[in-house]
Amino acid sequence: MSTEPRTPMMRQWHEIKRAFPDALLFFRLGDFYELFYEDAEVGARELDITLTGRDAGAEGRVPMCGVPYHSVEQYLSRLVARGYKVAICEQVEDPKSAKGLVERRVVRVVTPGSRIEDSLLDARANVYMASVARARQRGRTAWGVALADVSTGELICADAGDNPWELLSAWDVAEVVLPESLAGEDAEAGARALGASVTRWPDRHFDPGHATEFLCRHFGTITLAGFGVPDRSPEAAAAGALLAYVEHTLQGRASQTTELRRWEGEDALRLDPATRRNLEIRQRLDGSFHGSLLWAIDFTMTPLGARLLRRWLDFPLRDRRVIEARLEAVSALVEDGTARAAIRAALRGVQDVERLVARVATGRATPRDLAALRESLRASERVLQAAGPAVAGLLAEHADALQPPRDVLDRLETILTERPPVSVSDGGVVREGVSAELDELRALQRDSRATLARMEQRERERTGIRSLKIGYNKVFGYYIEVTHANRDAVPADYVRKQTLANAERYVTGELKELEDRLLHAAERALQLEAEIFRDLCASVAARVAALQRLAHALGVFDVVAGFAELAAARGYVRPAICEEPVLEAAALRHPVVEALLGPGRYVPNDVRMDADRRFLLLTGPNMAGKSTYARAVALCVLLAQIGSFVPASFARIGLADAIFSRIGASDDLAAGESTFMREMVETSRILRQATERSLVVVDEIGRGTSTYDGLAIAWAVAEDLILRIRARTVFTTHYQELTSLEGRLPGVQNLTMAVEERPESGEIVFLHHVRPGAADRSYGVHVAALAGLPEAVLARAREVLASLETGGQGRAWPASTAPGDVPAPVAAAAEAAQADHPGAPAAASQLSLFGSVGAERRAAHPLERLLRALDPDGLTPREALNLLYEWKRRFGREERP
Ligand code: ADP
């Protein structure tokens, strides 16, 4: 600032603002938070509020705008959603007792990743703040990452190898904290690709030694080895820097963080970002939640369970033992419906213990929060009782943690009133019988009130004014009010205090004395209540770790009971888990499509994959259910590996190390500038990363480019998957040509979607039933008809199709396809593509000739020749009909080239 601000308050503002240069400063002034200077301009613009000015002494008027304190959260959420940071500056002493300028301090910095306020958070999802640290190790660059959820206290770190962004992409990261030296293009672009906002944080926080020391001090340890984190490692650097930033946003100790967890990503089944998107796990391709896998399977009752389920879905397991522990637990609750119902009923009383505890630990809890915690602890005991003997597997590991810490629950029960107010300053937080002094003060207040009532009665009798009343207001205190009509009856000892339109207010010495006593008692009582409440919070905070374990256990019970409910409601079965790369299921359904269609409308299908059937090639018309089948297979494996039952009547699943799913460009609604490019990028990722233990679902690859290109690519990709990678694969395609791989390459099985053609109308019906074999034809024109394409266009399409089908007659298929050979169909396709080129004289140009120049230049179809030779007048109706049947037999099922 060029001019030294004159008024002391503006000087205070400048001083505070200097410490938070990158945040909008919400400066508390009475009942408002005010913004000044550029902050005010941003605030007025973003919040759509009026920009005013304030006299700032020598500076003249400076821009200002403000929001009322009671609705601040709504404004905060708008600013934070747009990526702003907001420093909340409060008055930290009572303006009444302040001498001169009220002391103010920033008590909290709200950033996209550091939201703790309930109103700014989705209860069913975590919001993470992440940090990324880089180190040189043995001549190569090593990355460490850390993640923190400030609202729950969770702190995780991981060795991210050579790419921190892939690891972070599996988490909901709202803000990435980068060392200033890294805040260049690459790292920032990586962070922004996650949809996160970027914060720069001084490099010294990321120094591995400094960060390790900082963490050790926080946890009271001398090394991080106990957490499984190497001291001075890149992940320790990331975690230390992140925790320091968390403390900056909280403007105090992050006491809700009681543990550092090392993330062992290698233990999880791998799902790359494209696969997560394509399988529509958390949301559909169009961004909606309705119709996602999570939507279909989330039967949880509490925010704790909802968040844990997301975590399980984001990180499916690979360790058979851990999966079995979950399945065992689910199984027990599927069988014991009574216990399941009782657990779920008890869970209804559980609130967001994790976030409540975090608020207690950071000194932000309200009396209502403690009451909610108490209610949840009571419910936790009920959950434990309800589970009874049905506790098995994973639940057995967590049952003990459900027992609330006795001391905490006892204190909450004995001290806190049943329905405390939101704010301690409203009083009524502490029960009777907790403090003798408080009880006495309350008795005094009660007595005084009775005395007041008696005094009012007595004065009415003494003055004869029946409408006389004793009242109270904040400015004047207690008064006796007499209407003007009765002014003459007012006794001489009444002292006038205030005149209203139709009444006069007075005090007496006696009233004043009573008032002093009463106000003093009330004030002292509130002070006492505040002290007792603080103590209570402290004793709860002392048990943070146990309460966090309890919160986690509640989440586990909730998810497991939800899985059991899902299984019971929709007829899911426990999958048998094995290590061999097999996949068998009977009456398999797609969990989401089944849920959307409602009971009984989904056509179940079987699947069988093993060494002889590793590669299922699924052909069939559009809309017949190919991709639904392929995804059902992938989701079945995914569900099994998060420990859920699966939508089938029987399932045996060989654990997969990864699931890859790729869908053709034209199915991809989230289309970018080049969907085909993206399709190829994702395909190459599959080919580079999939192993023999992976499950690969490739849906309509090559659709984003010309037919021959597409066929050539699909063919080559299929061969690579079959011969080199040998992963279990479901490959759907509309390229009939690929069906010739069956019998020529090992492990290939052709499957097709059954379609029924109504002989009378020629209409086709999709049966959604998968059977061995290849599709007869594509039926694309039929689908177009179903979609309502105009009849004239359809008729023309049938003509063109007939012409193409006869034109392709001569194409030959290879006798064998060996790796390395250019497969003949591809060569043929390439030839044909050549012929397609303008100027090339060839058979392939007949499409343009057909109809415009004349039918006589085409090579005639045999049926056409027969028709030409036929004299219909020479036929009996019976013969005509026989001929029709004969032709139908000969040509009706003809393979399309
Ligand atoms: P394709 O991939 O062959 O074009 P889809 O898998 O997209 O076909 O399926 C088309 C529609 O058919 C889906 O929207 C779904 O509602 C329905 N469908 C698919 N499979 C089944 C099934 N097994 N039972 C009932 N309806 C199904």
Image: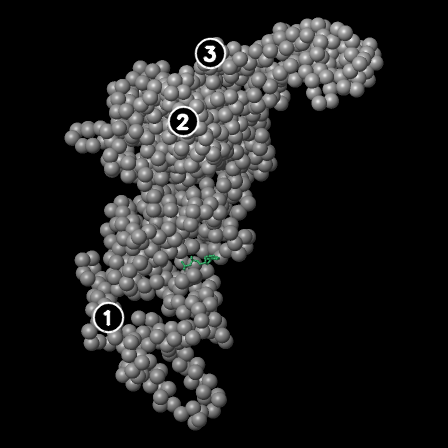
The answer for how far apart the CA atoms under marks 2 and 3 are is 22 Å
Mark 1 or 3, nearer chain start: 3
Q: Residue 533 lies in what quarter of the image?
A: top right
Q: Position of residue 642 (x, y in %)?
A: 42, 39
Residue 646 visible in the shown view: no
* Disc nearest the viewer among 1 and 3: 3
Residue type of the residue flagged with mark 3: Gly
Q: Is residue 748 above or below residue 385?
A: below
Q: Residue 498 lies in what quarter of the image?
A: top right
Residue type of the residue flagged with mark 1: Asp
Q: Is residue 193 above or below residue 252?
A: below
In the rendered image, which quarter contains the C terminus? bottom left
Q: Secondary structure at mark 2?
A: strand
Residue 530 visible in the shown view: yes
Left or right of 886: which side holds 209? left
Which of the labelled discs sits on residue 62, or is there none? 2
Can you identify the residue that label 1 sits on? Answer: 836
